[in-house]
Amino acid sequence: MTRTWKIVTGATLGLALIAGGGAAIVSAREQGPGGPMGQGRMGRRGPGGPGGIVPGLRALNLSDAQREQVKAVMDGHKAEFDAQVQKAGAARKALHDAVTAETFDEGGVRQKSADVAQVEADGAVLRAKVHSEVWALLTADQQQKARELKAQAEQRSGQRRERLEQRRSQRAERRRGV
């Protein structure tokens, strides 16, 4: 494996990790401690964790009735989310084991990678389903505010990516002695 290939691969993986972490941080800041309902519904990886089902749900000033309805939707899907978290963890562990195996098995790595992709797709469908149920509970004004919060979060994420790229460029220049 050439040095350039290692650098490109490392940079790509690093960017993916940073982008995912940045999105989680933005969502967590918007929601405050405990997720969208302030209760930490399903931990950091579940729908009540960073990002939630509708980012910024706390800022939408839900009525007591809406809060109860959202709670009912989330409780109604708790078992599905719990199963999803378990499947995802097992699939990622199996992929990690295949990648770090002592002997290289391209077919095995590809299969485990496809398994992770399928589990993640199933999770995306579940999140979309629950999102649509929660979205339907919001008033038109609350939906508009949620759209605005999402746009603001995306803008901040883009600004963070730009700052990160600037720092990388500056570091590269310093290494080259420019």
Image (cartoon, rainbow, N blue to C red):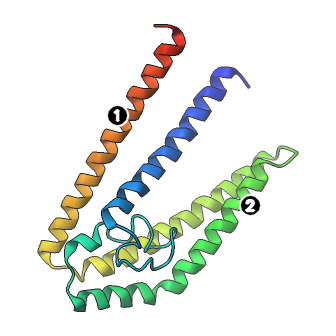
Outermost residue toward the right?
102
Q: Quadrant of the C terminus?
A: top left
The picture places residue 93, in percent across and down from the top left corner, at: 71, 61
Which residue does the numbered mark 2 point to in the structure image?
94
Q: Is residue 71 left or right of residue 110?
A: left
Alpha-carbon span between mark 2 and mark 1: 35 Å
Q: Residues within 10 Å of mark 1 (few under 14, many from 20)?
A: few
Which residue is at 45% across, 69% downward?
Answer: 49
The picture places residue 122, in percent across and down from the top left corner, at: 52, 70
**Amino acid, disc 2:** Ala
The picture places residue 82, in percent across and down from the top left corner, at: 57, 79
Which residue is at 43% across, 22% downward?
Answer: 169
* Viewer-proximal residue among 142 and 91: 142
Above or below residue 69? Residue 136 is above
- Which quarter of the picture shows residue 83? bottom right
Which residue is at 67% across, 60% downward?
Answer: 92
Outermost residue toward the front?
33
- Which quarter of the picture shows residue 30? bottom left
Above or below residue 36? Residue 120 is above
Q: Is residue 95 left or right of residue 141?
A: right
Q: Nearer the viewer, mark 2 or mark 1?
A: 1
* Viewer-proximal residue among 123 and 52: 52
Which residue does the numbered mark 1 point to in the structure image?
162
The picture places residue 128, in percent across and down from the top left corner, at: 39, 71
SS category of the residue bearing label 1 = helix
**Amino acid, disc 1:** Glu
Q: Is residue 167 left or right of residue 100?
A: left
Which residue is at 48% across, 44% downward?
Answer: 18
Above or below residue 107? Residue 42 is below
